[in-house]
Amino acid sequence: MPIFKELKFNYPITVDNLGTKIRISGLVIGKNKVKLSIRSEKTNYLLDHVTGICQYGSGNRISPLIHFDNESKHNILTPNPSEALYKNTLFQKGRFKNIVCYKFVTALKSISLVENTQYKNWFGKYLPQNLITKSIGPRDSFLHSLQACFPHKHLIPVSVESVRINKNIDQHEYLIVTGIEKNKNDDLLEYDLQVTSEDGTVLETWKGLLLKTIGEELPIKEWNPYLLGSFLERKINESEKNLNIRVFLDKAIKKIDNSMYAKQVVSNFARILRRSDNKPETDEIKVSCSKVDNLVLAASSNKDIGCDIAIVENLRWESLLGQKYFRLAKYLSDETGESLEISATMAWTVMESLKKSGKLYNHPVTISSINENFVVFNSDNTLIYSYLANVYDEDRSFIITLAMEV
């Protein structure tokens, strides 16, 4: 199989119910090297919608871009993030909708299972249907599987440094797709993407895949827990670029204690140590963890950090919070228009997160900003993010709070 290099997706090709005509042109520019372009009748064949170089040669063997580690051993995630993505974020349907489930999701990495469905009749009925590789629909799913790392905005492809394809890819019913973010620059994200068989054979690699975020933030009312962790990490790091915050939210089956796994995820599977005050940390980063029912929240930073997750409920908050934090809860309720139960639960998580970060929780706490479900607080040299979330398959609301030294 040839290598495809310097692919650029300059303009989308729109296809209506009647279909559309395209022209594919090739120009030989060197030995075993052809420059390709795709044009469309929608733009009168005047624009190169897609361009790239196709290179043949004996040295086109595929080498692994990504090596499997502890993430790949995790069980299939439940509830399935792909169901939430196709409902709230993705617009792909029919033969382009092929993600079966996810095995691992964070803001920087995803591992998904894609069904390698090989549809026929991609072109007009009087045109040849022969294809060198039949995985057209699944190949679109390779790309949009990365949307789990950025669930609140649409991602579109801009360019790819190189694509290598194993000719045997069509022989496999299911494919494992792993994507890792390598770099981020404003609204541009660079990924390496690797497709393997279920036994680990490398079948396709996309090196230097550049994606761009477009449009407004999507109004997601009910979150899949795994996507919520990615969302919170993205939102906080967009505002606090120097902290390198990692956030992971896990949902245990049958209330199994999976807090150690969550802490390992946010610490890149480093060895977790315990300080004399029982706070977890590694040799290089600080780690915090919180658990409520079967939801586990873990967060890490290169500075002191504390996190807390709590169910919104009606408790004797005045006696639990004390005078100072109960006043904060009432003020917060007046400012946001939310119920006292929500504001009091948020005040509680603020207090607990400050404790876990090693700060004196009796320091003054001020409200910095209120933006929809987000409330940002300040306390001395600590920044506190609180988020009100509705979680899929849970009939209760949750408050998630992170306190970070800045």
Image: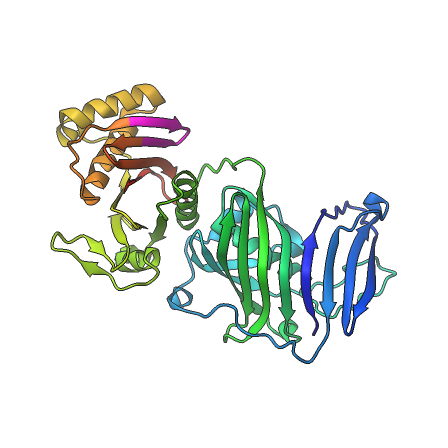
Residue 369 falls inside the magenta stretch: yes
Residue 55 picture location, percent across and down = 72, 70
The residue range painted magenta reads 367-376
Residue 246 picture location, percent across and down = 36, 50
Residue 210 picture location, percent across and down = 59, 53
Q: Quadrant of the C terminus?
A: top left
Residue 394 picture location, percent across and down = 36, 43
Question: Could you tell me what secondary structure mostly forms the magenta stretch?
Answer: strand
Q: Residue furthest right?
A: 126
When the figure is inspected, residue 117 is found, relative to residue 400, above or below; the finding is below
Residue 236 falls inside the magenta stretch: no
Q: Residue furthest bottom?
A: 58
Residue 193 lies in quadrant: bottom right
Residue 362 lies in quadrant: top left
In this rendered view, identify the residue nearer to me: 343 or 157.
157
At x 73%, y 74%, the residue is: 56
Q: Is residue 150 left or right of residue 124?
A: left
At x 21%, y 55%, the residue is: 280
At x 65%, y 79%, the residue is: 59
Q: How is the image coloured?
A: rainbow
Q: Residue furthest top?
A: 334
When the figure is inspected, residue 349 is found, relative to residue 27, above or below; the finding is above
